[in-house]
Amino acid sequence: MTTYARAHTNIALIKYWGKANRKLMLPATSSISLTLNDFYTDTAVTFDPSLNDDRFMLNGEEQNPVAVSRFLDRVRHLGKISTYAQVTSLNHVPTAAGLASSASAFAALATAASRAAGLNLSPTELSRLARRGSGSATRSIFGGAVIWHRGHDDASSFAEPLAIQPSLPLRMLVVTVSAEKKAVSSRKGMANTVATSPYYDAWVASNESLIEPMITALAEDDLALIGKLTELSSMRMHAAIMAEEPPFTYFLPETLRAWQLVQEQRALGIPAFATMDAGPNVKILTTEPYVDILLTALRPVFGDRILSTRLGPDASIITKEQ
Ligand code: PMV
């Protein structure tokens, strides 16, 4: 029998960057994200006794199944089965957006594979399981505004929706600066920051101090504060990255151009705030009434390389036809 699941990507407002425990995938800090409606992964899993190996198809192309297989080993262990699986995924994340899809990918895989293995995991258990595939996937089990508690062991490191969700009509604009595969993966990148950046400890301390203020700002719909904290977390993360040995940055010239445009709009009174992950693309946080104004301001430079989305739902089991 085949099980289908869908999970949506998320963008962190307060970032995760650096592990406290690499084996258990425990992060050094808690993080807070928004799940996005328009970008998601659909994954089908079939445990098939006739297979001699796990197989993984992504967007119609056979892939090296190593990472998927390692993840499935954990599912097999939990489900007490030994059968190999066929995993078939479709990324509804426009490839041109250059958005990382590991969050939606592992959240969808955790949801589909655990059910296919006969397990009936709670959302918290799914979040812990997804964490083993990719840190950001921990948060993609849930919709809306989500916190990943860093925890101190496997049981205590999981995500959950914030108790008081923002009622603002939040929107995220994704500006594609480059659609190329990222130069340095987040896994390698964060390991190098931990190992060589003299600013790493300051990053961890300052990022953790943004968590409580962000919970309050989201609960109080304080957009100016949500935006300020978002930019602080992102820029501090990138500052720690720049100070690595050898020095490195994900910024490209057009990345700065996007930040500049956001600042210009803000000076005009438009609530717009920028954040970046392990790549050069810029995500802009705003609310629904300002989307068109921002699109008009950004289009002369970025043309149609801008997508806009509202907040998305929880990961879920779906029927094939959805
Ligand atoms: O868990 P990963 O490998 O997708 O790393 C996520 C790292 C950032 O996207 C930069 C920050 C975050 O919290 O999502």
Image: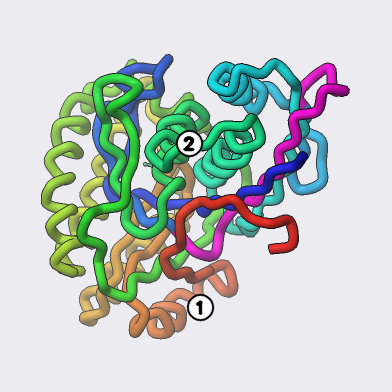
Magenta stretch encompasses residue 160: no
Q: Quadrant of the C terminus?
A: bottom right
Q: Amino acid at mark 2?
A: Leu
In the image, is residue 20 above or below residue 234? Answer: above
In the rendered image, is residue 254 in sight? yes
* The one of 274 and 128 positioned closer to us in this rendering: 128
Asked whether disc 1 touches disc 2, contact meaning CB atoms under 8 Å apart, the reply is: no
Dominant SS of magenta comes to strand
Q: Quadrant of the N terminus?
A: top right
Q: Whereabouts is ligand 1, in terms of quadrant?
A: top left
Residue 225's x, y, as percent?
15, 62
Residue 318's x, y, as percent?
63, 55
Task: Name the residue tied to disc 1.
Answer: 300
Residue 305's x, y, as percent?
57, 67
Task: Name the residue tied to disc 2.
Answer: 121
* The one of 34 and 297 positioned closer to us in this rendering: 34
Residue occupying the point 43% across, 84% down: 292
> Which disc is residue 58 wearing?
none
